[in-house]
Every structure is written in C-alpha cells, then in structure tokens.
Amino acid sequence: MRSYTTQRIFDLIVSGSLLVALSPLFLASMIWIRLDSAGPIFFLQERVGRHGRRFKIYKFRTMVADAELRGAQITIGEDPRITRSGRLLRHYRIDELPQLLNVLKGDMSIVGPRPEVPRYVDEYTPEQREILSFRPGMTSPATVSLTGESILLGEQSDPESFYREHLIPVKISTDLEYSRNAGFISDVTVLLTTVLKLLDAGHRR
C-alpha cells in the first residue's frame, strides 16, 4: 500500500518533468486550437475529487465552444461537436495533458480513479462512494482497459444510460480493486501501460 508522501513525491516529479519536457507540444496545441475554431483554448469542468471535494479539471478544448448546450455531457464516436484539431488531440489523449497542472496543485494524482462530474457521483451507492477516499488520477487500470469507450458508447441506442448503468460500475469496481492495494511499482506499471497504449493507437491511426 502506497503512502501519501510517496505518492505525492511521485506525482510532483512526474508532472513537473512532463510539463517541462512537453512544453513545445503544449504550445503547438494551444496555437492549433486557437487557429482551428472560435472559443477558449482550455476547457474547465467541475469534477468530484477525494472526500467529495469539487475542483475544476483542465483540458484542451476539443469541441465547439457551446458543446454542452448542443448535446450530452458524454462524447460518443464521431460526435459532430468535436473540432478538427480536437479529433487528433483526443486520439492521442493530448487534450488530457493540462491535468498535469491539477496534479501539481494536488487536485489529482498521475495514477488514480478518473474523477466524475457531480451528477454521476450523486448516484453512487454507499459501496461505490469508497472510490472517493482515493485521490483521482489522470490514468487508471479502468482507463487502460476501456480505451475504446467513445466508440462503444456510439454503438448504443441510449449512450447516457449505458454509461451510467454499465460503464460507471465497471470503472469503479476495477479502480477500487486496484486502489486498495496500489503501490509505487504498480503505479509505474499503469503509467507505462498507458503510454504503450497511446503509442499503439498512434501506430494504428
């Protein structure tokens, strides 16, 4: 079982190093988003973190500026609200990189259960709420195993209900089992597996 101190040191070293190393990619993404479509560069959304504390999660904007007014909060398959730049950013998960700032702030960890929006968390059972005792992360075992989530949702007649009734329970169960026994080595393994998945996605594009 990892200690808070060990996890925090790991988070600070990894997030700080990646922010420096990936700064050219950050700059290129920001310029492309600005040139590609009208609206802000960053997308901020309220999520629920450890012990139910709410925070603003940072992402590069990948959809039209008023996307939440034009459809559901979840994104499916070939969602028409996704911008040209957004498709590439999402494919390689570059849109998630601003969450390194959330990690530096202490809102999130590199590895941990993905944080959900409040309206989904409000529906958690008492057993599922145990997931809120862990700091949310940028990637997790559930994230790695559900890389085709948006495609799967696009195949459903009611994507919203499918997400709430099927995917959320699977995510919570998978990440709870991991988080209860996670350690430094297992966190590094999840991080490296995530990177390999992204590289494989790029190779198959």
Image (tube, helix red, strand yellow):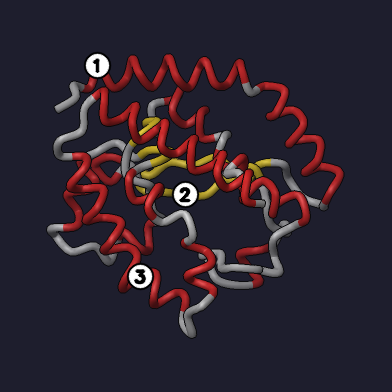
- Specify the amino acid type for callout 3: Arg
Q: Residues within 10 Å of mark 1 (few under 14, many from 20)?
A: few
Measure the alpha-carbon separation of dots 3 and 2.
18 Å
Residue topped by disc 3: 164
SS of the residue under disc 1: helix
Disc number at residue 5?
A: 1
- Please determine whether, in this image, residue 20 is positioned above or below residue 187: above
Q: Mark 3 or mark 2: name the one nearer the start of the chain.
A: 2
Disc number at residue 46?
A: 2
- Closer-to-camera residue (120/199): 199
Q: Is residue 191 left or right of residue 43?
A: left
Q: Quadrant of the N terminus?
A: top left
Horizontal and vertical percent position of residue 63: 69, 57
Q: Residues within 10 Å of mark 3 (few under 14, many from 20)?
A: few
- Closer-to-camera residue (69/196): 196
- Please determine whether, in this image, residue 187 is positioned above or below residue 52: above
Horizontal and vertical percent position of residue 84: 78, 55
Q: Residue at x 82, y 52 (%)?
A: 37
* Residue 107 in sight in this render: no
- Specify the amino acid type for callout 1: Thr
- Please determine whether, in this image, residue 85 is positioned above or below residue 25: below
SS of the residue under disc 3: helix
Measure the alpha-carbon separation of dots 1 and 2.
26 Å
Q: Residue at x 76, y 49 (%)?
A: 85
Between disc 3 and disc 2, the foreground one is 3
Q: Residues within 10 Å of mark 2 (few under 14, many from 20)?
A: some
Measure the alpha-carbon separation of dots 3 and 1.
34 Å
* Residue 67 in sight in this render: yes
Q: Mark 3 or mark 1: name the one nearer the start of the chain.
A: 1
Q: Mark 1 or mark 2: name the one nearer the start of the chain.
A: 1
Q: Residue at x 64, y 42 (%)?
A: 60
